[in-house]
Structure formats: C-alpha cells, structure tokens
C-alpha cells in the first residue's frame, strides 16, 4: 500500500490514477513480478504482487513511486515528498489471507462510497477480471479458484463480517510490521521498550502520531494499558502546544 504524504489526495484526478497505472504497466515488465490485483483510490493505492525476489519488489515500487512523484510535482508546480514513506507491505502466507486481501482491494471503492458496484470503478483489477483486459497476471487466481470466473463467484458471496475481520487483520499485521521496523531501526528489544519511558514515548509518537495507528490497537499489541498510552500521547501534545494542559486525558 502507498499513501499520499499527510494523507493528501494525490490520486484525486482521473489522469493521476491513469498515470500511476501506466507506470505499473511499464515497470512490471522490467522486474520479475506477477501483478495479481490493484486498486488506485483518491489518496492511496493497493497492489497485490507475487515475486521470488524481494529486491525486485523494492525496485519496482521505487521506480513507479519516484516517477509518479516527479510527474505530480511538475504538474502542480511544487517540490518535496509526495508519498508517506516508501510503501507499506505485508507478507501473505496462506490462501485464506490471500482471498481476503483480494476481496478487500476490490471492495475498497464500494466501501468508500465512490461507486455502488465493484465493476463500476475504472481504476481497479475487478474490471480486468470481468473483461479479461488489462495488466494483471491471472496464474495465481487460476491456481486458487480454477479460473477467474471461479474467483468472481466466490467474491460475490462474501459477507460484510468477513470484510470487517479483514480490516482488523490488516491493521494488526501492518502495525506489527511498523513496530518491528522501529525496534530494528533503534536497535532495541520490546522488553526494554516497556521499561524505558523515553523509548516508549518515542515509539508511541512514531506509531500513533506519525503512522496514525489507533491507540487501542497499539495498547493491545504492546500489552500496555490504554490509559498509559493515552497519557504519553497527551503529555507530548501538551509539551508541543497541540492541546491545552487542562484537557482531560482520553483514549480512543
């Protein structure tokens, strides 16, 4: 997943979406990847990719994002970063999770109330699947479901509850990746974080304020009370003048 810096709507015009998709088409041939699904929304995009080499994935994403950033900045006459970080990724290691990711990606425009039906959205692979046109590789889909039609049939029978579960699963996996990256970048272990107030504050600021993960999820994953997490965040905001000292500490 890639997202605009500060959640800006970098894909809000149809030609921005088309430019990003054209870059995907261009660079997927250069690197050893299979593009299974994509969906370009207003301020973010999802891509589902198979690769034997993680370096190919990194180079592919680096190229499409850097080329889009140059195009976008030139088009609107600005300078600076366009994307929020490089890209956020997660490893899919079983068929159930793969199916949930496929469904989630294709249902994104409907859940965002952009269209009534998945096939009404021009900038995702759902139409590629229906019309057998586009840029996806259906080898993985055919192996899983026998055919693209088999996938469509399964997709049409999804329940709202399964999508709700997918949202939670996705957030938890991404959050764990973000925390692991923080630990690695700071060369510190989780058990030290819990006893080091300064590092815990640094982690909370990075994960909650910068990466926008919910306090309740962070509390659950770290095994630290919501009130303690909330206090850390609010004390930081008071110190930086973002909220008045008289405001009560609240958790989400």
Image (tube, rainbow, N blue to C red):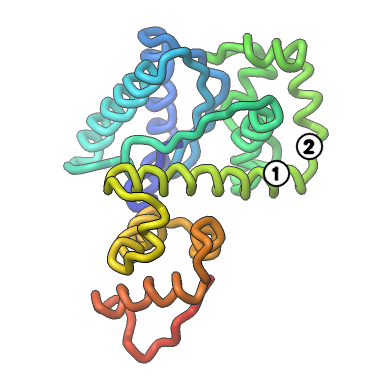
Work out whether 148 lies above or below 44: above
* Crowd band around label 1 with a 10 angstrom C-alpha radius: few (<14), some (14–19), many (20+): some
- Please give left or right for residue 69 compared with residue 133 in the image: left
Residue 120 appears anywhere in the view: no
> Real-space Cα distance between discs 1 and 2?
8 Å
Q: Specify the label residue 163 is tagged with.
A: 1
Determine the residue positioned at 43% across, 31% down.
17
Q: Point out the tag, 1 or 2, that comes first from the N-terminus.
A: 2
Residue 222 appears anywhere in the view: yes
Q: Position of residue 38 (x, y in %)?
A: 53, 27
**Disc 1, disc 2: CB below 8 Å?**
yes
Of 162 and 122, nearer the camera is 162
Specify the quadrant of the image occupied by residue 29: top left
Q: Position of residue 250 (x, y in %)?
A: 49, 79
Q: Specify the label residue 158 is tagged with.
A: 2
* Crowd band around label 2 with a 10 angstrom C-alpha radius: few (<14), some (14–19), many (20+): few
Of 14 and 90, nearer the camera is 90
- Please give left or right for residue 32 compared with residue 102 in the image: left
Determine the residue positioned at 34% across, 56% down.
206
């Amino acid at each position: 997943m890639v997202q605009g810096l500060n959640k800006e709507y970098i894909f809000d015009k149809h030609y921005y979406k088309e430019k990003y998709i054209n870059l995907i088409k261009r660079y997927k041939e250069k690197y050893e990847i299979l593009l299974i699904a994509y969906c370009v929304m207003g301020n973010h995009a999802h891509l589902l990719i198979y690769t034997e080499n993680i370096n190919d994935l990194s180079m592919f994403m680096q190229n499409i994002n850097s080329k889009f950033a140059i195009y976008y900045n030139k088009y609107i006459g600005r300078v600076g970063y366009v994307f929020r970080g490089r890209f956020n990724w997660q490893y899919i290691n079983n068929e159930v999770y793969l199916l949930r990711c496929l469904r989630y990606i294709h249902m994104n425009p409907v859940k965002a109330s952009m269209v009534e039906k998945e096939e009404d959205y021009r900038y995702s692979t759902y139409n590629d699947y229906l019309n057998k046109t586009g840029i996806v590789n259906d080898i993985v889909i055919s192996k899983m479901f026998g055919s693209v039609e088999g996938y469509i049939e399964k997709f049409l029978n999804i329940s709202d509850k399964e999508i709700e579960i997918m949202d939670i699963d996705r957030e938890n996996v991404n959050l764990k990746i973000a925390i692991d990256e923080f630990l690695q970048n700071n060369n510190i272990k989780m058990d030290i974080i819990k006893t080091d107030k300064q590092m815990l504050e640094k982690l909370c600021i990075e994960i909650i304020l910068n990466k926008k993960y919910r306090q309740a999820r962070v509390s659950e994953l770290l095994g630290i009370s919501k009130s303690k997490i909330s206090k850390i965040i609010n004390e930081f905001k008071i110190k930086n003048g973002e909220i008045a000292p008289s405001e009560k500490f609240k958790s989400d």
